[in-house]
Amino acid sequence: MLNAMFTAPPSLTTANAHLVLQEGLTAIAAGQKEFDFAATGQTDSSAVAMLLAWQRAAKAKGFALTLRNLPASVQSLAALYDVASLLGIPAPASNQAQAGFAPPHHHQVVSHCASH
């Protein structure tokens, strides 16, 4: 019998990404559509790659995953890599340009030329 939700482990890092990836793919193959990350605290960029692989596998089966309690660190990385929409993660309230990635305003440009 299929559990109501796949529960992700406390850590999703390069140390265990391959194992957790396989567990998730097995759950998706069995029809699992909801993944819970409430217990997950430690993550790195491998978690984003794993989520993309899971969504791709779910899409091949004809559905999208529901990702619950996704850690803020994973949401931030997904936004930084511009893949949040592929993962079904809502866009952050402010876009990346407003979060410090925009060039300085023209009045704030500092000249590095020596004065004569």
Image: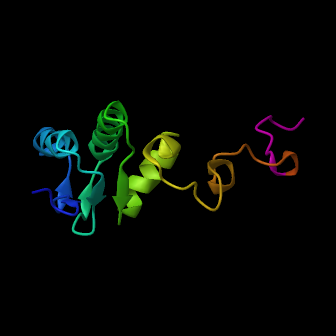
> Is residue 114 a member of the stretch shown in magenta?
yes
**Residue in the image at 19% along x and 39% along y:** 29
* Colouring convention used in this rendered image of the protein: rainbow
Above-or-below relation of 42 to 105: below
Nearest the viewer among 99 and 51 is: 51
Q: Is 52 displayed left or right of 11 in the figure?
A: right
Q: Which residue, as the protein is rendered here, is positioned at the far top?
A: 60
> In the displayed structure, does residue 34 sit left or right of residue 27?
right
- Front-lying residue, 110 or 27: 27
Q: Residue 8 colored magenta? A: no
Q: Position of residue 45 (x, y in %)?
A: 32, 44
Tell me where residue 43 appears, x and y as whole percent.
27, 54
Q: In which image quadrant can residue 11 be found?
A: bottom left
Q: Residue at point 80% right, 34% down?
A: 113
Coordinates of residue 65 in the picture (x, y in percent): 36, 49
Q: Which region of the structure is painted magenta? A: 108-116
Q: Which residue, as the protein is rendered here, is positioned at the far front?
A: 1
Judged by its main secondary structure, the magenta piece is loop
Q: Residue at x 28, y 57 (%)?
A: 35
Location of residue 63 in the rendering, given as x and y in whole percent from the top left corner: 38, 42
Among the 4 quarters of the image, the one containing residue 53: top left
Which residue appears farthest toward the bottom when viewing the image?
38
Which quarter of the rendered picture does the C terminus lie within? top right
In this picture, is 3 found above or below 13? below
User: 4 or 116: which is nearer to us?
Assistant: 4
Would you identify the image quadrant in which residue 1 lies?
bottom left
Labels in figure, total: 0
Please name the residue shown 81% across and 51% down the image: 108
